[in-house]
Image (cartoon, helix red, strand yellow):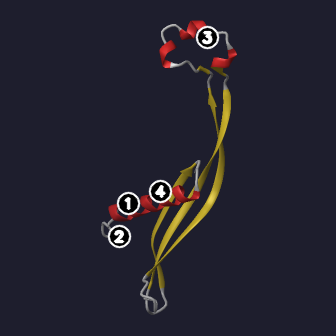
Amino acid sequence: MSDDGFDAILITAVNGVDEKRYYTTGYYDVDYRWRRFGHYYYRFQDIYYTLNYYDAYKVYHIETSIYYINEDETKSLVWVGVMDVVNPQTITSTVKDYETNIIRQLEREKLINKL
């Protein structure tokens, strides 16, 4: 145990990033009031039609390790978890979601008590 009262170290690292693409087919953007006949009325008016397109996003491969630190300076690996974070929007929400998932998994594996 450290002088500050800690008995474990948690390390998280990004092990890689993949670029992914997906294809979206075209669709008509018609107001709900026009759904009955809007498809026919707006069919050839490009303003109401969204073309097919490709969209890209990133997948981050993240690994977290927990080490137990003893008083006698030996360290032992206690747990390793990996997770893919898909298309993160903000650092704040991404870290919060990741933290929540790690805590839930550690609780399921009974490595920590439920908070």
| Closer to the eye: label 3 or 1 | 3
Residue at coordinates 33% horizontally, 61% vertically from top-left?
A: 108
Q: Amino acid at mark 1?
A: Arg
Residue at coordinates 65% horizontally, 53% vertically from top-left?
A: 17
Alpha-carbon span between mark 1 and mark 2: 10 Å
**Residue 48 in the image: x percent, y percent?**
63, 18
**Residue 53 in the image: x percent, y percent?**
68, 29
Q: Earlier in the sequence, mark 1 or mark 2?
A: 1
Q: Amino acid at mark 3?
A: Tyr
| Closer to the eye: label 3 or 2 | 3
Vertical comparison of 49 with 6: above or below: above
Direction front: furthest residue: 33
Vertical comparison of 34 with 59: above or below: above
| Closer to the eye: label 1 or 2 | 1
Instruction: Find disc 3 in the rendering and name its residue.
Output: 42
Instruction: Find disc 1 in the rendering and name its residue.
Output: 104
Residue at coordinates 38% horizontally, 65% vertically from top-left?
A: 106
Q: Earlier in the sequence, mark 4 or mark 2?
A: 4
